[in-house]
Image (tube, rainbow, N blue to C red):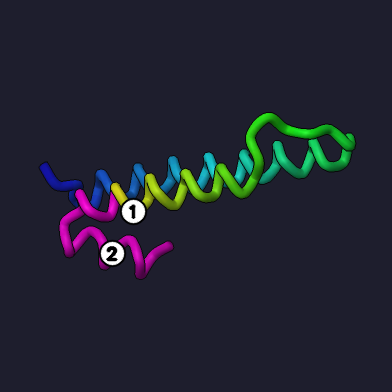
Amino acid sequence: MKFNIQDRIVLDEMIDTFTAEMHKHQDDAELLDKRTIITREYWLSMIEDVQRKIDNFTTKKALSHSKNHR
């Protein structure tokens, strides 16, 4: 099964929202001088890995649409 444009829009929104919340959480922890259990670099690495896997299961049309509108 390949993700179509509608699927891809939802997945892009989920990843973007998660990434924004992760950065907010990490920034808040830094302001409070607290150390997080999972580092920002690790989260970014995992997000990149998930993104790559989603790209592999996305139709060419949906992938080009995503790249143009993100």
Question: Is 51 one of the magenta-colored residues?
Answer: no
- In this view, the mark in front (1 or 2): 1
Residue at figure coordinates x 38%, y 45% from the top left? 50
Q: Quadrant of the C terminus?
A: bottom left
Give the percent coordinates (x, y) of residue 69: 39, 65
Name the main secondary structure of what is drawn in magenta. Answer: helix
Q: Residue furthest top?
A: 37
Vertical side of 60 occupied by 32: above or below: above
Give the percent coordinates (x, y) of residue 68: 35, 70
Give the percent coordinates (x, y) of residue 56: 22, 53
Q: Which labelled disc corresponds to residue 43?
A: none
Q: Which labelled disc corresponds to residue 65?
A: 2
Check whether the beta carbons of the residues at disc 1 and disc 2 lie within 8 A of each other: no
Residue at figure coordinates x 56%, y 43% from the top left? 43
Q: Secondary structure at mark 2?
A: helix
Q: Earlier in the sequence, mark 1 or mark 2?
A: 1
Q: Is residue 27 left or right of residue 58?
A: right
Give the percent coordinates (x, y) of residue 40: 64, 45
Residue closest to the eye, 12 or 33: 33
Vertical side of 58 occupied by 37: above or below: above
For the residue marked with disc 1, what is the amino acid? Answer: Arg
Residue at figure coordinates x 26%, y 61% from the top left? 63
Q: Which labelled disc corresponds to residue 52?
A: 1
**What is the span of residues highlighted in magenta in the rendered image?**
54-70
For the residue marked with disc 2, what is the amino acid? Answer: His
Residue at figure coordinates x 35%, y 66% from the top left? 67
Q: Quadrant of the N terminus?
A: top left
Crowd band around label 2 with a 10 angstrom C-alpha radius: few (<14), some (14–19), many (20+) = some
